[in-house]
Image: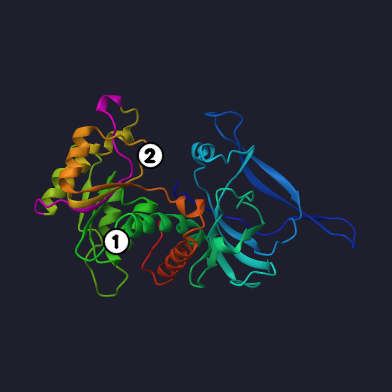
């Protein structure tokens, strides 16, 4: 899941031992789940010193770490269950030491990155070891908290808009829940690429926030979002509003924030009542459109598939963990991380943490 907040982690530790041998004790935060479905409890683990720095490792003093959802189901499915689950994978910090084969970094470099799924390291620790291929340099203008709190949302936005669909000038993009941290970055990326953006808002506060968003270019007063659809009262038809905004042509790219899979009476929470039904999304898609979904349990009935066939439309599943599950596209992944930091530094991206 997207980073929900950032907690500064200051370097330090309790020191003990004689003058000849100094031991540094550090605490790291882990999650513990005794059985499937059980709530996670959080525990601090103490460790004395780090293991020796391996050839491709970078020793990082953590300055900020974003707190993210621990997807225990995904970890179980890819056989990465363990007794203690590291907490906090998006980190920013300062390089203290590098392994002898490290070529990208040197001590005192400021870095940011996402720890891989199989990492034994908790980002909520004073000092950690990270393979150099999971880090990029942090621009000086970007603060620690912004870097750690935005990097995952940036990866998700790039995955959705560049790799699962091809956002380009003239296209229309619908971003559901645009006031969320992820939605905000997706809107800014789509608009920067020349697309027209429509967004939904789940509250009056979110609607006002989206209407105030402006491009970073001085003198341009037009909003980033061409139309904000307030769905908070449950009375607005999203499909109808999108078709009206596009002159009946439909949108080219839909980036959802979950969909309603069942009838209204079957939905359990008030938030799920506000989600669009999958039929609505198919209706508002244009010819050759792309539907990028975050709903891992999406089920399409034959009539749904037939409607998508008639439009030549596609459905893609947004799973940003794919970049760390295989090293085949490591170069592309690092390019994404670098571009996110550049856009933060130049204010093209403005984080909402």
Q: Main secondary structure of the magenta part?
A: loop
Closer to the camera, 260 or 285? 285
Regarding residue 238, the answer to whether it shows in the image is no
Disc assigned to residue 237 = none
Element under disc 2:
loop
Point out residue 242 in the picture as x, y percentages from the top left corner. 16, 49
> Observer-nearest residue: 338 or 66?
338
Q: Which residue is drawn at 71% across and 58% down?
A: 12
Q: Where is residue 84 in the image (x, y as percent from the top left)?
A: 64, 40
Q: Residue 200 or 163: which is nearer the viewer?
A: 163
Residue 111, position as x, y percentages in the image: 56, 66
Q: What element carries label 1?
A: helix
Question: How many callouts does the rendering have?
Answer: 2
Query: In the figure, residue 54 lies in which quadrant?
Result: bottom right
Residue 351, above or below 73: below
User: Which residue bears the numbered disc 1?
Assistant: 190
Quarter of the picture containing the C terminus is bottom left
Residue segment shown in magenta: 247-266
- Tag nearer the camera, 2 or 1: 2
Question: Is residue 257 in the magenta section?
Answer: yes
Q: Can residue 293 be seen in this view?
A: yes
**Residue designated by label 2:** 296
Let me know if residue 75 is in the magenta part: no
**Residue 5 left/right relative to 119:** left
Crowding around mark 2 (Cα neighbors within 10 Å: few <14, some 14 to 19, many 20+) is: few
318 w.r.t. 79: above or below: below
First along the sequence among labels 2 and 1: 1
- Classed neighbour count for the residue bearing mark 1: other residues with Cα under 10 Å, few (<14), some (14–19), many (≥20): many
């Amino acid at each position: 899941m997207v980073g929900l907040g950032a907690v500064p982690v200051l370097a330090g530790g309790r020191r003990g031992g004689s003058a000849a041998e100094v031991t540094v004790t550090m605490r790291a935060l882990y999650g513990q789940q005794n059985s499937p479905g059980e709530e996670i409890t959080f525990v601090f683990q103490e460790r004395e010193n780090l293991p020796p720095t391996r050839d491709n490792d970078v020793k990082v003093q953590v300055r900020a770490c974003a707190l993210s959802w621990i997807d225990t189901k995904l970890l179980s499915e890819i056989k990465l269950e363990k007794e203690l689950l590291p907490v906090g994978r998006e980190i920013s910090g300062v390089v203290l030491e590098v392994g002898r084969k490290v070529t990208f970094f040197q001590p005192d470099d400021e870095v940011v990155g996402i720890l891989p799924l199989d990492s034994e390291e908790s980002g909520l620790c004073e000092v950690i070891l990270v393979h150099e291929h999971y880090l990029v340099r942090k621009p000086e203008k970007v603060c620690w908290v912004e870097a750690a709190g935005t990097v995952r949302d940036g990866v998700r936005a790039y995955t959705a808009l560049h790799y699962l669909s091809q956002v380009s000038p003239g296209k229309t993009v619908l971003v559901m829940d645009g006031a969320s941290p992820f939605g905000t970055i997706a809107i800014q990326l789509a608009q920067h690429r020349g697309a027209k953006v429509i967004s939904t808002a789940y509250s009056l506060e979110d609607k006002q926030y989206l209407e105030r968003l402006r491009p970073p270019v001085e003198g341009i007063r037009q909003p980033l979002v061409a139309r904000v659809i307030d769905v908070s009262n449950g009375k607005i038809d999203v499909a109808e509003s999108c078709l009206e905004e596009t002159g009946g042509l439909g949108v080219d790219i839909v980036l959802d924030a979950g969909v309603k899979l069942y009838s209204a009476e079957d939905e359990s929470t008030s938030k799920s009542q506000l989600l669009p039904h999958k039929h609505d999304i198919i209706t508002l898609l244009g010819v050759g459109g792309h539907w990028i979904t975050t709903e891992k349990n999406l089920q399409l009935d034959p009539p749904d598939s037939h409607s998508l066939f008639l439009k030549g439309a596609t459905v893609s599943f947004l799973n940003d963990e794919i970049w760390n599950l295989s090293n085949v596209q490591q170069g592309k992944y690092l390019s994404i991380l670098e571009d996110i930091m550049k856009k933060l530094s130049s204010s093209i991206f403005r984080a909402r943490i």
